[in-house]
Amino acid sequence: MEKNTKKGFFFKQYEAPNLSPFDKLFEIFKELITHTSGDFEEAIDWLRQLDVEYKLTDENYTIDDFIEDLKKKGYIRDELKEDGTSGTGITAKTERAIRQAALDQIFGNLKKTGNGNHKTKYSGNGDEKTGEFRDYHFGDGLENISLTESLRNAQINNGVDEFRLTENDLVVEDAQFKSQMSTVLMIDISHSMILYGEDRITPAKKVAMALAELITTRYPKDTIDILVFGNDAWPIAIKELPYLKVGPYHTNTVAGLQLAMDMLRRKRNTNKQIFMITDGKPSCVREKDGTYYMNSNGLDEYIVEQCYNQAAQARKLHIPITTFMIANDPYLQKFVNRFTEANQGKAFYTGLKGLGEMIFEDYETNRKKKIK
């Protein structure tokens, strides 16, 4: 008797994941602590307000119970504030949880692969054995010859009684290049990143955390360095990202590019690149005497010419720059187009939505090719 099987879709009412009260609040807490730049008290205040509006807790598990669990699990600790008063701060465990949450949120659809999955299409004198064999060709290194397979061929071809090893018997274990990448991510922290009623720094911060977590966990042989730029530029550690804030700064793009290139000069990886997230025009440069030349009115020719020079310098060093412009003003696009042309890099004009996916796709594309 034949069985009739039907294929199709089955729809049912959505069932939320069965999370504990702590896990439900912790998901919200990680989002809030990112928005408050690591300010625990402010994040808890926001959580209490959300609890009043959306009934997140009940008499069996309160916000105070949640705070106590955070302490027991090692997510928060007592600390001394800058003003000398006591307070509560997040721990390194929380910082890691925030980065992982950003990675899941932005790159959650990634397929998991083994560590160091950085193969290119190039084969030959690479640095990662493939397990596949081929005939020896003139120019192959002696270290790539498979002795076992070569001796086996010699026995088959020439016999055991009159054993001899010829070039025709030699077998080489093939290898592939691994295109390890060194990346510097530049984040604009000028005042415009929070102007006009739009929080642009938090999405940029999330992208940085996600990219850092992606590279350190999935591609551990790659390197990622992060710098911020306002009136000046300075590097920050990955653990500092949750606390990143916008300052009352102009935009010194030149300083950021100079620092990024200095950082990449120290890297041994052949492939190097710069990602720059910005929303505004360059409006500041530092002179040789230590003073600052600033002009926020339009595009100052003196400032933008120095930006073009830095783009050209990066090109000479074989460092492509990918600019993610969180603005769509026509005159800014004209500047970015010329900047990109000077570097022979790439530019994306994007809003905040989809920024992380775009950066990931560009990173994946670049690491699959040899950047020369």
Image (spheres, helix red, strand yellow):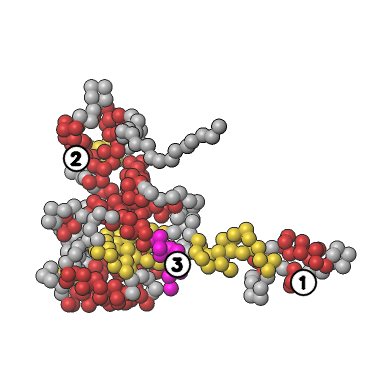
Neighbor class of circle 1 (other Cα within 10 Å; few <14, some 14-19, many 20+) is few
- Distance, label 2 to label 3, CA atoms, is 45 Å
The residue labelled by disc 2 is: 42
Which structural element holds mark 2?
A: helix
Amino acid type at image mark 1: Thr
Residue in the picture at 77% in, 61% down? 152
Residue at 19 percent across and 32 percent down: it is: 54
Residue under numbered circle 1: 166
Residue shown at the point (39%, 73%) measured from the top left: 318
Which residues are the magenta region? 363-372
Question: Residue 227: x percent and y percent?
Answer: 30, 60
Badge 2 or badge 3: first in the primary sequence: 2
Q: Position of residue 13 (x, y in %)?
A: 31, 33
In the image, farthest residue toward the front: 1
- What amino acid type should be assigned to the residue bearing mark 3? Lys
Residue underneath mark 3:
369
In this view, 277 is above or below 49 = below
